[in-house]
Amino acid sequence: MNGTWILVPSLLAALPLLAGENETPEPPVASAPAASVADPRVATALKSLGYEYSLTADQDYKLIFEVSNDKRTQVVIVNSNTEIFDKAEIREIWSPALTVDDPIDAALAQRLLKANDT
């Protein structure tokens, strides 16, 4: 895909991505490199929700959702690797909102960044 991706947070960010609600996962070492294998906890959660997915070359989970009657789709990426902040395990989930071929106006970029925070 050519162009620049404009990203927005995914609605899937609220998914319970642990194997079970009462289980405490073994957090990865804070200085661990990017995952070389897909995190099986994500697969378990996605399967329990009935979502189909594929794996990217980086072993992240890629989901494609049909979001309109005209067959428009939205891609969502769930990273396999996580980071530790204090005692919380953080997993990045993102989705491209727009692909552009030319640089966007600085004011628009600033507005999108501010809106992304909400």
Image: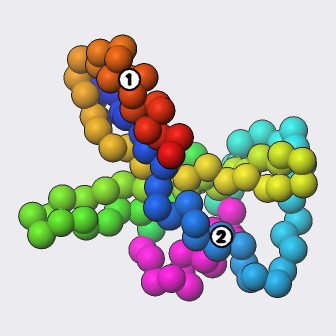
Q: How many marks?
A: 2
**Rendered location of residue 104, percent (x, y):** 29, 19
Q: Nearer the viewer, residue 28 or 68?
A: 68
Residue shown at 36%/14% (left/top)?
106
Q: Nearer the viewer, residue 105 or 103?
A: 105
* Residue found farthest to the left: 70
Relative to 4, 66 lies left or right: left
Determine whether 50 is above or below 87 in the image.
below
Label 2: element kind? loop
Relative to 50, 17 lies left or right: right
Determine whether 7 is above or below 107 in the image.
below
Q: Nearer the viewer, residue 16 or 40?
A: 16
Dot in front, 2 or 1? 1
Q: Residues within 10 Å of mark 1 (few under 14, many from 20)?
A: few
Residue shown at 35%/17% (left/top)?
107
Q: Are marks 2 and 1 in contact (CB under 8 Å)?
A: no
**Rendered location of residue 66, percent (x, y):** 25, 67
Determine whether 32 is above or below 69 in the image.
above
Which residues are the magenta region?
39-52
- Give the position of the N terminus as an image quadrant: top left
Residue shown at 63%/78% (left/top)?
44
Q: Main secondary structure of the magenta part?
A: helix
Residue holding disc 1:
109
Amino acid identity at mark 2: Leu
Residue holding disc 2:
17
Relative to 90, 23 lies left or right: right
C-alpha separation, residue under disc 2 versus residue under disc 1: 31 Å
Label 1: element kind? helix
Amino acid identity at mark 1: Ala
